[in-house]
Amino acid sequence: MATKAITFYSHRDGPNPWKNVILFEELGIAYDPTYLVFGEGSGGVEHETFLKINPAGRVPWIKDPNTGIELTESNLISEYLAEKYDTRGIFNVEGEQNKLLVKQWLGFQAASQGPFFAQALIAQHKLKNEGSTKHFQALVKRTITTVDRALQGKEYLVGGKITLADIAFIPWDRALDTILAGDSESATAEQREKLWPNWSAWHNRVMQRPSVQKAVQIQNTEQGKK
Ligand SMILES: N[C@@H](CCC(=O)N[C@@H](CS)C(=O)NCC(=O)O)C(=O)O
C-alpha cells in the first residue's frame, strides 16, 4: 500500500486521467491531483513548465514518491498501479494468454478508442466539419462494434472477470452522447443498446462498480456539476 500520496497531473474534462482515478479509488491509493488546462498558457499542458516534466504535453502523468517512478500514458500508469498496489489481485487474470489479452485490449483502447473518439469530438464540436465528423463517427461506431463482437457471451473482456482492459474504456465511453451527437442511428443510449447489446450491458456493468461511481462523482465535483 502506498504510504505517500502519488503526484498526479490531470485534467478536469480530458477522459484519459480518469482511468487512473478509478484505479486510485479501487486500490485505496492516496494521490495528490493537479489539474492542468489545455494549451500553452499558465497551467497548460503545453506550457514550458509542464513540457519539462512530460515532453508530450499531455496528461495523465504521475510521480510515485514511494518508488521514484515517473510515468505518462494512462494505460501504462494503470498497469504500474496494479502491479505495485493491487495486493488483493482485484485486476489479476490467470495465464499468459489472458495476461496478453489484457495488454491487447489496452493497446486497442489507446490506438483506436481514444484517438477516434477524441477526433470525432473535435471534428463536430470544435472544427464543426461535417465530413470529418461523419468520418470519425464511423470509426467510433466500428470501434464499439469490435468490442460488442468480442463480448458475445461474455461479461468482461478477459478471463470472465474485471481487468484493467474493462476500466480503460469507461471514461471515453461515458462521453458518447457528445461524441455521437447528431448521428441518426446511435446518438442516444437507447439506440446504442439496440445496436450493441453486449457492449451496452458490459458498459453498464462496469459503471456500477463503486470505484467507477466515485471517480464520476469526483469528476462531476471538479467540473462544478452536482
Ligand atoms: N495515449 C495518452 C493520451 C493522453 C491525452 O491525449 N491526454 C489528453 C487529456 S485526456 C491531453 O492531455 N490532451 C492535451 C493535448 O493533446 O494537447 C494516454 O492515454 O495517456
Image (tube, rainbow, N blue to C red):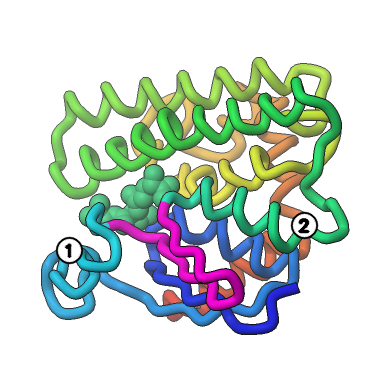
The residue labelled by disc 1 is 46
- Dot 1: element: loop
Horizontal side of residue 141 vs 201, given as left or right: left
In the image, the segment drawn in magenta is 58-72
Residue at image coords 67%, 26%: 100
Q: From the image, which quarter does the N terminus lie in? A: bottom right
Q: Earlier in the sequence, mark 2 or mark 1?
A: 1
Is residue 152 visible to the viewer in this orientation of the structure?
yes
Q: What residue type is disc 1 on?
A: Glu
For label 1, being within 8 Å of ligand 1 is answered: yes
Residue displayed at 28% across by 61% down:
54
Between marks 2 and 1, how big is the CA–CA gap?
A: 34 Å
Give x and y (percent) for residue 121.
Answer: 30, 43
Residue 19 locus on image (x, y percent)? 56, 55
The image quadrant of residue 115 is top left
Q: Is residue 64 magenta?
A: yes
Q: Residue at x 69, y 75 (%)?
A: 2
Taking the spot 72% from the left edge, 31% from the top edge, the residue there is 99
Q: Indicate whether residue 76 is drawn in magenta.
A: no
Residue 40: quarter of image: bottom left
Is ligand 1 less than 8 Å from the beta carbon at label 2? no
Quick one: 105 or 171, which is closer to the camera?
A: 105
